[in-house]
Image: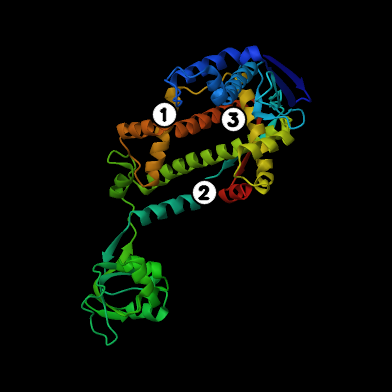
């Protein structure tokens, strides 16, 4: 077997692979002997069929398999031995590849186009400046957090009569055309209604001022102007809701008003646990400032990572074999249209350039992710997910169990390792360049991200 390479430019090359008869003859012969032992051919006992008949029936397919296997193995070995980093996969050369006659040829030449990853350097020093945005924690942001906490921890209290922004709990009974209760009608009990969500203003006004025990007759579909809302409210099927054309009697059992929680030690313990050191509103404000600042640092770091990526892509701008890559994308993604490839191609090139830059920095700085780092990061993700559901204090063993579950999924594990590795790459850049720090408000920062 003979493999030759001709570099057509810095990032494209042509590989010619010549497979000759001595390369495949013995493996093909051995495979045909195996076929002979197993073949079930009428008129012959297993293992006794003439070899000529075996070759006639199976020779071509065995030859194809062995040559293709040999080709794949040798290509892989060649790329490793030559330490060639290629992009995509080798593609058959459409100009130089000659037709192969599998019935008569004894030597086979295969011609491939390959894309070579460009050799790059990523010089970094203090002369390089990248913006770093520090977001200020404002009093308004703290006030919004406090208001959200008071709303989340608030509860409904019973009042004497229905208010515009109040709630009522009661029982529905479906009525017939004469205003009588339907014996087999819809009768959900204990339904909670928010008065300000009733769309029909006339029906809304009927509720205001009513008391426990009062009865209101109305059409729920007309009141809410939303069949899906009525479906959930009356606990009926989708079909029933769409066919509904009845008035209902609604008997008020409770008149309620939502009351936000008060700021006190009991509330602070509910939020942060029994052992919290938060005793006053000032303590809470200071804690919220810290939490907001921590979250905003995360936002700043995310923005900085994006700016690092854009800055280095522009600075290094690795040369890429664009024509080859478009062709490879067509071959590798049969279900993707030409229009989709064209629309997404610039983004694909940007991602690829960033990957090449990351690979250089990783190799240059010998970066790697340890198992313990990945496990601790998975625990942080678990804790953040629990916090989203209003569960701030989760036992460590529960977080560890969640982290193990994440890392058992190969796709999730790879995503997590890649994220940590990219964070390390950005960290290297941050240490080597000059940061152009800019203090901005949350609104200004949001505008930057548009």
Query: Pointer 3 and pointer 2: residues touching (CB < 8 Å)?
Result: no
Residue drawn at point x = 47 percent, y = 43 percent: 292
Query: Callout 1: few (<14), some (14-19), or many (20+) C-alpha neighbours within 10 Å?
Result: some
Q: Position of residue 304 (x, y in %)?
A: 60, 37
CA gap between label 3 and label 1 equals: 19 Å
Dot 2 falls on a residue whose secondary structure is loop
Q: Which residue is mark 3?
A: 426
The disc, 1 or 2, on the residue closer to the chain's N-terminal end is 2
Residue 376, labelled with which disc?
Answer: 1
Q: Residue at x 33, y 54 (%)?
A: 153
For the point 77% across and 31% down, which residue is it? 95
Residue lying farthest to the right in this orientation: 8
Q: Is residue 132 visible?
A: no
Q: Nearer the viewer, residue 185 or 207?
A: 185
Q: Nearer the viewer, mark 1 or mark 2?
A: 1
Q: Position of residue 124 (x, y in %)?
A: 68, 25
x then y, percent, for residue 22: 64, 11
Q: Quadrant of residue 11?
A: top right
Residue on which the image places disc 2: 138
Which badge, 3 or 2, is on the more N-terminal residue? 2
Q: Is residue 117 left or right of residue 241?
A: right
Tally the numbered discs: 3
Q: Report which quarter residue 258 is drawn in.
A: bottom left
Q: What's the CA distance linking mark 1 and mark 2?
A: 31 Å
């Amino acid at each position: 077997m003979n493999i030759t390479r001709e570099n057509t430019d810095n990032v494209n090359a042509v590989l010619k692979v010549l497979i000759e008869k001595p390369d495949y003859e013995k493996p093909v012969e051995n495979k045909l002997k195996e076929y002979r032992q197993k073949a079930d051919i009428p008129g012959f006992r297993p293992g006794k069929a003439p070899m000529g008949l075996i070759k006639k029936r199976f020779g071509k397919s065995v030859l194809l398999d062995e040559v293709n296997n040999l080709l794949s193995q040798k290509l892989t070995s060649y790329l490793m031995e030559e330490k060639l980093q290629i992009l995509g996969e080798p593609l058959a050369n459409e100009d130089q590849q000659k037709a192969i006659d599998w019935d008569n040829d004894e030597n086979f030449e295969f011609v491939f186009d390959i894309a070579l990853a460009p050799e790059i350097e990523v010089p970094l020093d203090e002369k390089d400046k990248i913006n770093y945005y520090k977001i200020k924690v404002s009093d308004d942001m703290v006030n919004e957090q406090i208001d959200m906490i008071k709303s989340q921890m608030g509860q409904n209290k019973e009042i004497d009569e229905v208010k515009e922004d109040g709630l009522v709990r009661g029982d529905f009974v479906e009525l017939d055309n004469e205003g009588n209760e339907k014996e087999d009608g819809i009768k959900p009990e204990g339904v909670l209604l928010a008065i300000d969500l009733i769309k029909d203003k006339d029906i809304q006004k009927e509720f205001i001022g009513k008391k426990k025990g009062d009865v209101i007759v109305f059409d729920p579909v007309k009141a809410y102007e939303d069949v899906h809302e009525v479906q959930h409210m009356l606990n009926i099927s989708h079909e029933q809701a769409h066919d509904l054309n009845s008035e209902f009697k609604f008997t008020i059992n409770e008149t309620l008003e939502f009351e936000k929680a008060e700021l006190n030690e009991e509330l602070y313990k509910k939020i942060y646990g029994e052992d919290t050191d938060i005793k006053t509103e000032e303590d809470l404000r200071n804690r919220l400032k810290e939490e907001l600042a921590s979250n905003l640092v995360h936002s700043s770091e995310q923005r900085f990572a994006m700016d690092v990526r854009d800055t280095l892509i522009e600075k290094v701008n690795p040369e890429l074999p664009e024509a080859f890559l478009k062709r490879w994308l067509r071959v590798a993604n049969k279900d993707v249209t030409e229009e989709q490839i064209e629309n997404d191609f610039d983004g694909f090139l940007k991602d690829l350039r960033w990957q090449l830059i990351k690979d250089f920095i990783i190799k240059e700085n010998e970066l790697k992710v340890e198992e313990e780092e990945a496990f601790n990061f998975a625990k942080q993700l678990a804790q953040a997910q629990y916090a989203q559901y209003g569960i701030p204090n989760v036992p460590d063993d529960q977080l560890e169990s969640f982290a193990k579950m994440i890392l058992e999924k190969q796709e999730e594990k790879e995503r997590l390792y890649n994220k940590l590795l990219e964070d390390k790459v950005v960290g290297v850049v941050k240490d080597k360049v000059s940061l152009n720090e800019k203090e901005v408000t949350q609104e200004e920062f949001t505008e930057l991200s548009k």
